[in-house]
């Protein structure tokens, strides 16, 4: 349906939105011609692919001729919320992806000189001056994905040189060289040590965390979700030890055509996410798709069918609950509008939710008031998505029973 429309349209705008295909071409045209070598400061950033797994391609991402002062923004999702979709695409289109053929088990015994250099770069906390020589000039292309940030030109590495000693935090250095600690424990320790989730993901992806015999290269898209999940589970354990929230709160935020409404209810921890993809939003040509997933107090044992977005949204709310030292039933609605015309990656979810939770919430005395308030900012009628909200329905039912029990008790006491 969507593909046939694109074939007929060919960029004429029949779908009523900016054409992501043309945006891809325009971004590519902005890329300066690349020869068989580049030099610049890597943000730092690395990418590990998944095609052909367990035989994959991995390497650093380098913006040509960019200095250490200007490099961080090329791979810093936390700073992108103030930009437009076009701005993000433009930045990422100028980040050259270098590829080296590897097996995921190569991380266990680092005898590959080029892999060692990639790992050294991944450990850095600040930009690293890098020189890459390719077998042939990188292809001028731009790739989009629902989990990964857009990626620019790519080429096979012939030689790789890091022209300075990377700056590595002591905590990172310690856990990278501790080959007896489990990867999940190392992730938890790094997070507690104020190492960002993006930094941790980079270390996990290039096989620098975990026991020696278990270490392996992890495709970047998998390491992103794994990091969100591991940290999320750690936070859930902590949050469950806190008292229940004592009021109803609603948080809101919208960025890049992603509208988030987050409802916190006084109860033990559980989490529910509803996604609503509107017509003409990315991946949709017409019609509306609504999906949902959830977990109760006992957690979940299967991978969410809402993919990485589920874990990214959950993490942002859990960080807030940890800050205020409370637990709650968490209900999130994510509505994807036509404004979201090119996929930018799961960081959009993570950072928009974090942004929402950093704002002052609206407070309510009754759940219906809260639902009515957030529903006013959702374009899709409440009747179309409320039936999907299983945890919300259970909460209302339990509260009704509790109220009924209280009323009966009062009647008996007056007899």
Image (cartoon, rainbow, N blue to C red):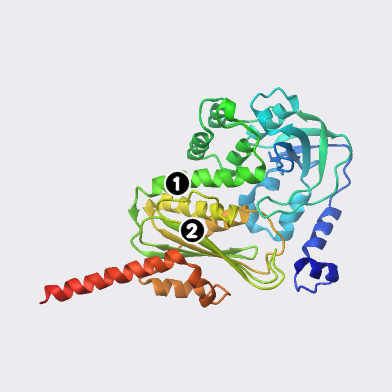
Q: Distance between the residues labelled 2 and 1?
A: 17 Å
Place of residue 281 in the rendered image (x, y in percent of width and height, measured from the top left): 68, 67
Q: Nearer the viewer, residue 71 or 134?
A: 134
Q: Quadrant of the C terminus?
A: bottom left
Numbered badge on residue 294: 2
Tag 1's secondary structure?
helix
Q: Where is residue 226 in the image (x, y as percent from the top left)?
A: 57, 44
Is any part of residue 407 visible from this angle? yes
Residue 272 drawn above or below residue 215: below
* Occupied quadrant, residue 179: top right
Is the residue 68 above or below the residue 304 in the image?
above
Number of marks in the rendered image? 2
Which percent across, then down, holds residue 282? Answer: 70, 64
Q: What residue does disc 1 label?
A: 235
Residue 295: image location, x then y, percent: 46, 55
* CB within 8 Å, label 2 to label 1: no
Question: Which image quadrant: the N terminus?
Answer: bottom right
Q: Nearer the viewer, residue 244 or 183?
A: 183
**Which tag is nearer the camera, tag 2 or tag 1?**
2
At a point 85% along the width and 48% down the height, the residue shown is 140
Mark 1 crowd level (few <14, some 14–19, many ≥20, 10 Å Cα): some
Where disc 2 sits, the SS reads strand
């Amino acid at each position: 349906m969507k593909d046939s429309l694109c074939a007929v349209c060919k960029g004429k705008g029949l779908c009523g939105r900016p054409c992501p295909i043309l945006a891809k071409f325009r971004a590519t045209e902005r890329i300066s011609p690349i020869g068989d070598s580049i030099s610049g400061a890597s943000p730092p950033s690395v990418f590990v692919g998944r095609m052909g797994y367990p035989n994959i391609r991995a390497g650093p991402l380098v913006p040509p001729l960019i200095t250490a002062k200007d490099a961080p923004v090329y791979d810093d999702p936390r700073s992108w919320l103030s930009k437009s979709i076009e701005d993000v695409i433009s930045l990422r289109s100028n980040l050259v992806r270098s590829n080296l053929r590897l097996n995921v088990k190569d991380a266990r015994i680092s005898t590959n000189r080029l892999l060692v250099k990639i790992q050294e770069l991944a450990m850095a906390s600040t930009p690293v001056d890098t020189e890459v020589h390719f077998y042939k000039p990188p292809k001028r292309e731009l790739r989009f994905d629902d989990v990964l940030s857009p990626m620019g030109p790519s080429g096979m590495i012939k030689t790789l040189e890091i022209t300075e000693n990377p700056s590595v935090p002591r905590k990172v250095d310690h856990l990278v060289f501790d080959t007896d600690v489990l990867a999940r424990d190392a992730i938890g320790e790094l997070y507690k040590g104020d190492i960002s989730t993006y930094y941790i993901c980079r270390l996990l992806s290039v096989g620098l965390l975990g026991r020696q015999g278990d270490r392996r290269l992890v495709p970047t898209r998998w390491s992103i979700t794994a990091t969100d999940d591991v940290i999320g589970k750690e936070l859930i354990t902590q949050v469950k030890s806190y008292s229940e929230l004592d009021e109803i709160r609603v948080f809101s935020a919208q960025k890049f055509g992603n509208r988030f409404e987050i409802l916190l209810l006084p109860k033990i921890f559980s989490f529910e996410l509803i996604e609503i993809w509107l017509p003409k939003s990315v991946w949709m040509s017409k019609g509306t798709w609504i999906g949902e997933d959830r977990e109760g107090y006992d957690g979940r044992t299967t991978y969410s069918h809402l993919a990485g977005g589920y874990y990214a949204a959950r993490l942002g709310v859990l960080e807030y609950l940890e800050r205020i030292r409370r637990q709650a039933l968490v209900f999130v609605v994510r509505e994807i509008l036509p404004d979201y015309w090119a996929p930018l990656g799961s960081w959009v979810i993570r950072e928009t939710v974090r942004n929402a939770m950093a704002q002052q919430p609206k407070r309510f005395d009754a759940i219906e008031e809260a639902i009515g308030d957030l529903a006013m900012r959702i374009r899709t009628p409440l009747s179309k998505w409320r039936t999907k909200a299983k945890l919300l329905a259970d909460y209302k039912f339990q509260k009704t029973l509790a109220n009924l029990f209280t009323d009966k008790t009062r009647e008996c006491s007056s007899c």
